[in-house]
Image: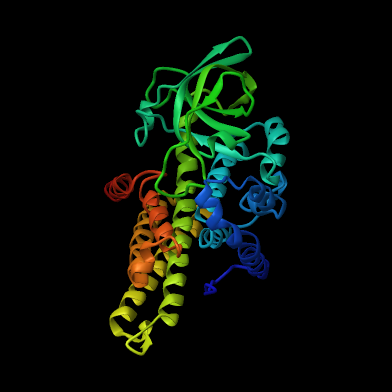
Amino acid sequence: MVVERLLPSSEAEELLAVVHEICADQLAPRVDQAEADADFPRNLIHLLGQTGLLSLPFDEDDGGGGQPYEVYLQVLEEIASVWMSLAVDMSVHTLSASAMARFSSDEQRKTWLPDMLGGSQLGAYALSEPQAGSDVSAIATKAVPDGDQYVINGTKAWVSHGPHADFWLLFARTSADPKGGLSAFHVPAGTEGVTFGAPERKMGMTASTTTSVIFDEARIAADLRLGDEGQGMAIALSALDSGRLGIAACATGLAQGALDLAVGYAKERHQFGRAIGEFQGLQFLLADMSAAVEAARATYLLAARLKDADRPFSRQASIAKLVASDAAMKVTTDAVQVLGGYGYTRDFPAERYLREAKVTQIFEGTNQIQRMVIARSLLR
């Protein structure tokens, strides 16, 4: 169904209508086969860039769309309701480009941002490592100064669309200080000494390739560092708050897609002489699914509106990520139940929705980490 949205402007309403059309005409016909084939849809990334969707939350002075974050997130949700992998890739790109927009020099922004926002430069986020996931202070990848260059050695794990990226936002250690020793770098694709692990064999989101990225004596120019040495932790954490909102919006969209599928099936499937949607037991299930989707949307929109107002939103971002990802898991599970045996087959996308939902409780900080963030904020 078309989601009822309360948008801040007529321009935003027109934008969402265009996105809805793109989803129906360009994404929906391709998603099932691409996911089955684990086919990364790079040409659709270009399409989103050419349409201006990759630039939405960035300042107009930088070539961005100048849209509030609440509008950008609802665009992301709309895409995720049709193609979760593509929406997550879009969110990761925004996360990766945001550091360039916020912490770079004027010259760096002039050189790199236009292509990032136009869709010809796809960004990946290289933070996690095999032994450093939620514990960012345990990062071991090193960037050692050598004249006018840095020499980088280490391995990054779980990098979304890692081998397809045109640049990586890399976080590496420039000193031994656990928290103050990280720095951020813009690493262009084609840098010598950068290789990739085998694609992870994931249970879902197979069209979004996930790999490790290996740096072996990789050299980059010193002017590709973003911000000051030692500022990497602050850059990473500031980006993660916004990234968690991106995942919350994606999870909400995924849940909405599953709800739409279940409602449509309940209207069409007949048993005992009537549509199964007429049975009260199924109606209650659908009602709970709808309530979970609406609650998830409300939490991420509150956090986004705080961000747009330049107010603290870290706790609300964690709440949104927690609520929306748990809702996605519940709603996709219930969608399979509504479809019964057909929900367990690949003839319908319900089983794919369920497989895709699980990771939303894991990446951008597990939901256990989100609970820690929320509790610490309350007790601070």
Instruction: Give the color scheme: rainbow, by chain, secondary structure or one colour.
Output: rainbow
Residue 122 image offset from top left, x and y in percent: 62, 40
List the single residue furthest toward the top.
147
Relative horizontal placement of residue 273, taking residue 213 as reference (left or right): left
The residue at the point 52 percent across, 60 percent down is 77
Against 123, residue 345 (above or below) is below
Position of residue 246 relative to residue 288, above or below, is above
Q: Nearer the viewer, residue 269 or 194?
A: 269
Residue 194, compared with residue 332, is above or below; it is above
Left or right: residue 187 versus residue 285 is right
Number of numbered discs: 0
Q: Residue at x 39, y 55 (%)?
A: 357
Can I make out residue 65 in this image?
no
Left or right: residue 226 compared with residue 181: right
Q: Position of residue 340 (x, y in %)?
A: 33, 70
Quarter of the C terminus within the rendering: top left
Of 315 and 83, which appears nearest the observer?
83
Q: Is residue 304 above or below residue 238?
A: below
Q: Position of residue 13 (x, y in %)?
A: 63, 69
Residue 1, horizontal then vertical, whole percent: 52, 74
